Amino acid sequence: MAEAGGHLTEKGAEFSVYSRHATQISLCLFDSFGETELCRLPMQRQEDGWHHVAVEGIREGALYGYRAEGDFNPDNGLWFDPAKLLVDPYALEIDRPFRHDPALQAFGTETAHLMPKARLIAPQTVKIVPPLLPQGGFIYEISVRGFTMLHPDIAEEQRGTVAALAHPAILRHLKHLGVDAVELMPITAWIDERHLSPLGLTNSWGYNPVAFAALDPRLCPGGWRELSETVATLHDNGIGVILDLVFNHTGESDRHGTTLSLRGLDNLSYYRHLPNQPGELVNDTGCGNTLACDAAPVRDLIVSSLRRFVRHAGVDGFRFDLAPVLGRTAQGFEPQGETLTAMLNDELLKDRVMIAEPWDIGPGGYQLGRFPAPFLEWNDRARDTIRRFWRGDTSLTGEIATILAGSSDIFGHDGAAKTRSVNFIAAHDGFTLCDLVSYARKHNEDNGEDNRDGHNENYSWNHGVEGKSEDPAILAARRRDLKALIATLFVSKGWVMMTAGDEGGRSQNGNNNAYAQDNAITWLDWQGLDRELIDHAACLSRWRKRFNTLADPAFFTGTGDIAWLSLSGQPMTVEDWQAEYGPGLAMLLTTNDGETGKSLRLAIAINRHRATDMPLPQREGWAWQDLLDGDDVTRLALPERSLAFAIESPRPD
């Protein structure tokens, strides 16, 4: 089989696309403006279902699309309509963004004037370096547009683009925080959900893809060169790049949705359908359709897309949205399924960082801890336990300790010695960290769905006032809780992730599903960020790097590497662990000090209750030093709702 998609040759170009059920696929070439169809060339069908055509004399920059002929019988899963121009699913570049229009849903209505055209390009191959994300590293989740739209130092024409991430002001911020890798929310081509336009809203997150490897012109107008140069600049500053990709559904949605690419090429081959009901799409994603990732053509499309991001941009890894879909077959989720295995074994991909969001909404969709190593996994149990602990929920002492120690109950099965947990408290989906301590309930009224959308249970609290407050006591209490939450995250074993702006107290006014808010709700207000909080996060990030046991994903063995203490300074008892409301606990860790290269003990005390102090175990010839002020201490100060830190070092002679 020829290389899939369109690619240049010495004589011109060759094009290949898969469709098992189409009677004819045609290549459509367009003028340089993408407005006039110049010719329509029939492609030759091969026995394996691939359609191929070679075109002499065609040059880089040519614009094209496909049309597919066959039966139009949606009840039997057939959606062939030659009036629909279809985007090459292997396209590397498109000439314009996708825009929703009712004509894209109507059978027999010409759509060439509405559709983006694929552009034939030959992106450069970049030097590929080992992934920069270290063991237990700090991942920083970024919405490219929302993160840079209001930055005062970035030129207006560059705001909202991938290139803006290479701006010196952004680099200074990332390096101050000690970010190890940025995780970019989708930057590939997407289309708005059909219900948004009548509401005057647009998708600001990009989790509604059409072309999996085509960079969206709104976010990356400079195409692959812009992405590769930005990745190179971040790499030069010691920062890795992880792409958040969506291989679970497409923006073609349910049977009332649009025909843009895969549906028109071969709906039956690319999407999952109910058994013996070819007209009924499986909706394990909640987005109207589900990709058939166990099908060979879809597997090829996924692996090919991943390889391109490595080969042409040098990215360090990937985060996969609703990742169980990648391992789904007709029998359910298979951790060793062909597609997941192909991703992990590919020569170009096998050393890349792979992160799973380990749940979807289909049967058996919650798969936390079941992805094959070396997949890292978003740990929502860590998220919820940390939230509930600081909210004041009862009987959580044992659970919070398990989370801090790396969630061995989830990731320690089959003899695993290391965690694969990505710990987080807030992400793009849900409350911001600040809203978590400012709102007791969601406020999604601006989304146009009467506040029905978004999670109802957020394990949040508001300190007595819902939303914004001018009360100094309430503001101080919220800042105190934010500092405690951030500190808890950074002392947890595994990888840690924060969403951009949460380190500075950003708010979305209580909106916990702000995907449709491409405005000030999601645009980061850089001038309104809390510098004290930012510096607090930066300090914790430095400590995490300094004391190796915090970032080391290896589980504690209990043979001198950790001791659990109550706030009385004594070893935890069964009664302490089982107390209905434990005020807190302390970890006594043996760790290497990155500043001196020597081994020492690190005490981390967590107090979620009233102000108190904690006696530290004393050893002859050694002294405890408070990390915050450097003073020698025998009792570690524990202000209410806070964490305290001390290191033990030899007492000077």
Image (cartoon, grey):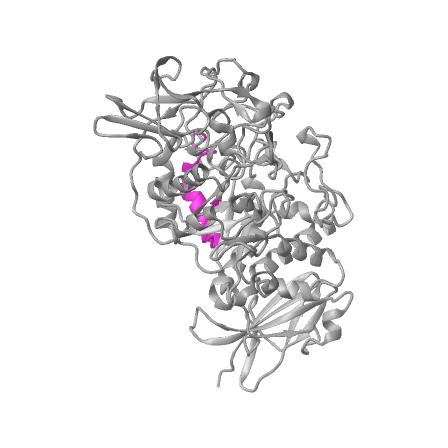
Residue 356 location, x and y as percent?
52, 49
Q: Which quarter shows the N terminus?
A: top left
Q: Nearer the viewer, residue 215 or 221?
A: 215
Visible residue check, residue 95: yes
Q: Nearer the viewer, residue 5 or 617?
A: 5
Q: Nearer the viewer, residue 544 or 249?
A: 249
From the viewer's perspective, tell me whether residue 372 is left or right of residue 304. right
* Extreme-left residue of the structure: 10
Q: Is residue 390 above or below residue 6?
A: below
> Residue at (68%, 28%) from the top-left corner?
448
> Residue at (56%, 61%) from the top-left corner?
411
> Residue at (62%, 36%) from the top-left corner?
286
Residue 353 location, x and y as percent?
44, 52
| Segment tinted magenta in the rendering | 155-183
Is residue 178 located in the magenta-colored stretch of the structure?
Answer: yes
Visible residue check, residue 173: no
Q: Is residue 480 above or below residue 168?
A: below
